[in-house]
Amino acid sequence: MRPSFFLIVFFLFGFVTLSSQTKDPRYQPKDYVEIKHPEWSKNATIYEVNIRQYTKEGTFKAFENHLPRLKKMGVDILWLMPIHPIGEKNRKGRLGSYYSVKDFRGINPEFGTMQDFKDLVQKIHSMGMYVIIDWVGNHSAWDNPLAKEHPDWYTKTRSGNFQPTPWYDWDDVIDFDYDNPDFRKYMTESLKYWLKETDIDGYRADVAGFIPIDFWENARAEMDQIKPVFMLAEWESRDLYKKSFDMTYSWTLWDHLREAVNHQKLGGLVEYLAHDVNSVPRNAYRMTFTDNHDKNSWEGNPYLNFGDGLKTAIVMTGVVNGMMLCYSGQEAGLNRSLKFFDKDPIEWRHDENEILFTKLFHLKHENQALWNGKYGGEMIRVVNNDPGKIISFYREQNKDAVFPILNFSDKEVDVELDTKYFQGNYRELFTDQVLKLKEKTNLKLKPWSYLVLVKQKF
């Protein structure tokens, strides 16, 4: 009896010790993302606005007429490309680049007045939407007054002259030096200026990774003291999520989607999904897209890049982990590259792309499986018998579930899916067809076709 008694005591002591160790804070999981996302962003969608090309007038006032349509589409965040005056020295084209900023606290007179901009922001807010503006913090126009007033705020060549950002052909801009504390203060105060004066909701940061992360972390903290801001980084790096940015670009998804469509090889796309699930912080947001101003102007329009698989790619960006972007005119079937330095208005018309974006945007609002960051469901791979052509996965959150199945090939495919753990009744998003999934599901998918199955609740 005595050995048994001591054995029991030993095991109890071991259990207590083990239990106390598991409470040690050193071994507790910690959220990598320390910033607090604005509450309204958890199921938000985003739309990029090219004011210059949006209307023939190219003004804030003219753009206002499109707000009801965008609201109906399900747009939440309106990201405006740079709204500041554009430099004239070394200007490219007749109108110049938005990203050659002559005054960080001014309004481009081509777009209207400061009051026009304030009216636009107020109108956007009154409709339950939000607005962020493009911030070009890495460089300025050659004729920005800062170059004369504070030449020490810029990097220099060996001969002591201003220079464009090293290694780039950005000849219309000159590079800032973030080693200068006075300059950092000026840029931080400028970011705060627009929050205070116009009540915008945040920023999209141009080439965010070229600017030191400690600058962004401090700037975010100071801005959040004014109001909860939403920050989008034109970059793809995990360190930006911790204390500075709510969302980064997902450049790699665009690359793998184009590869999947043009070469019908899904290895890169599958690897992307694996990395997203296993390496991206749970509460990080990623912006997914098939077009934006850079891709459109410098690498071709979506029809050129994705061909017959464009709709498949658009749907994929709307159901993976992330926040899908629609670029100006994309919903109208924009099938050309817009000029970047000159006037080139978008031709507005009804297009089937608008139906895709509208359906996916509204599903995002309603179905928690597709919400952003920790608010959404993890992508769980659903095994199918033709993984070289078919992508299939399942997302679930708080009893909401979405099951996308996409054919990334120009062939008709008879696909069998292992749906043992995903049984139930589903409604297909675009056709309203009801499907009952059992342990095994067999489907015939036409070339480039897709299903977005939404689980029915009882």
Image (cartoon, rainbow, N blue to C red):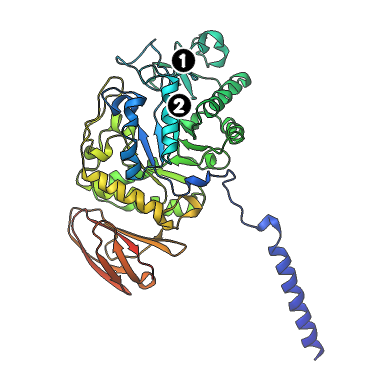
In the rendering, at what x and y percent does residue 332 appear? Answer: 24, 38
Residue 259 occupies quadrant: top left
Residue 265, above or below 130:
below
Q: Is residue 356 visible?
A: yes
- Name the quadrant of the C terminus: bottom left
Q: Residue furthest right?
A: 2
* Residue 118: mark: 2
Q: Is residue 339 above or below residue 141?
A: below
Residue 419 placement: quadrant: bottom left
- Picture coordinates of residue 155, whole percent (x, y): 53, 17
Where's residue 346, x and y in %? 24, 30
Q: Amino acid at mark 1?
A: Gln
Q: Is disc 1 in contact with disc 2, using a CB cutoff of under 8 Å?
A: no
Return the disc, 1 or 2, that comes first in the chain's sequence.
2
Seen from the viewer's position, the closer of residues 458 and 242 is: 458
Residue shown at the point (73%, 78%) measured from the top left: 11
Q: Which x, y percent locates residue 428?
A: 28, 61
Is residue 130 at least partly visible in the picture? no
* Residue at image location 70% in from the left, 56% down from the top: 25
Q: Amino acid at mark 2?
A: Lys
| Mark pair 1, 2: CA separation | 34 Å
Q: Residues within 10 Å of mark 2 (few under 14, many from 20)?
A: some
Rendered-image quadrant of the N terminus:
bottom right
Check residue 163 in the rendering and tell me which mark sits there, or answer none. 1
Q: How many marks?
A: 2
Q: Which mark is residue 53?
A: none
